[in-house]
């Protein structure tokens, strides 16, 4: 089975040290943001999956992301291709870009139909990544 696994694992240290997090959190909110930090989407028919391990992403996805089918698949694919190319370029330049943010490449290839759900999750992760870590992976700001 051809599995392409997108694993984005950022250290808890980066999460804890990021300046955009409120320093005062209730215990309930802190638990909710860290316990369900893994999102896995698998489609056996297409034989591709996406796994995102990122503290806070699941809560961001449910509270801020646009609903499914808001964007067309072609829109998601074009943004993903553009942003993934820039992300992978930054992974290859650890002296120029923070290697703690850009740890491993994303295997996303042009011309492969990953399906709507994989494209939707990858798109939203890349928007989350750019907004949370104040990164810009292109000539325009990521917005939802």
Image: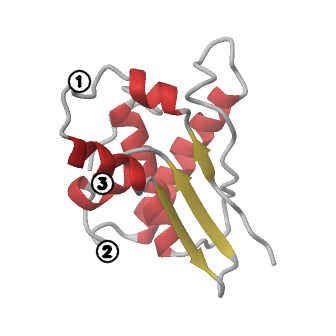
Colour setting: secondary structure
CA separation, marks 1 and 3? 18 Å
CA separation, marks 1 and 2? 35 Å
Kindly identify which numbered label has been placed on residue 69: 2
Report whether 104 appears left or right of 76.
right
Of residue 13 and residue 134, the one placed in the foreground of this image is: 13
Q: Kindly give the residue lying farthest to the top in the view shown.
A: 95
Residue plotted at (69% across, 38% down): 104
* SS class, disc 1: loop
Residue pointed to by mark 1: 23
Residue 108 pos. (x, y %): 66, 55
Check contact, mark 1 vs mark 3: CB within 8 A: no
Count of marks placed on residues? 3
> Crowding near pointer 2: few (<14 within 10 Å), some, many (20+)?
few
* SS class, disc 3: helix
Q: In which quarter of the image is the N terminus?
A: bottom right
Check contact, mark 1 vs mark 2: CB within 8 A: no
Kindly identify which numbered label has been placed on residue 59: 3
Residue plotted at (38% across, 23% down): 18
Residue 128 pos. (x, y %): 37, 44
Mark nearest the camera among 1 and 3 is: 1
Of the image marks 1 and 2, the number of the one nearer the N terminus: 1
Residue 118 visible somewhere in the drawing: yes
């Amino acid at each position: 089975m051809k599995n392409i696994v997108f694993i984005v694992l950022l250290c808890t240290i980066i999460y804890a040290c990021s300046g955009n997090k409120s320093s005062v959190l209730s215990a309930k909110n802190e638990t909710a943001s860290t316990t369900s930090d893994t999102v896995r989407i698998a489609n056996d028919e297409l034989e591709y999956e996406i796994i995102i391990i990122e503290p806070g992403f699941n809560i961001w996805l449910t509270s801020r992301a646009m609903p499914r089918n808001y964007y067309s698949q072609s829109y998601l694919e074009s943004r993903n291709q553009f942003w993934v190319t820039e992300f992978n370029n930054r992974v290859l330049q650890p002296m120029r870009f923070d290697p703690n943010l850009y740890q491993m490449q994303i295997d996303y290839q042009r011309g492969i139909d990953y399906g709507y759900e994989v494209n939707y999750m990858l798109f939203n992760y890349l928007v989350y990544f750019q907004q949370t870590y104040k990164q810009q992976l292109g000539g325009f700001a990521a917005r939802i």
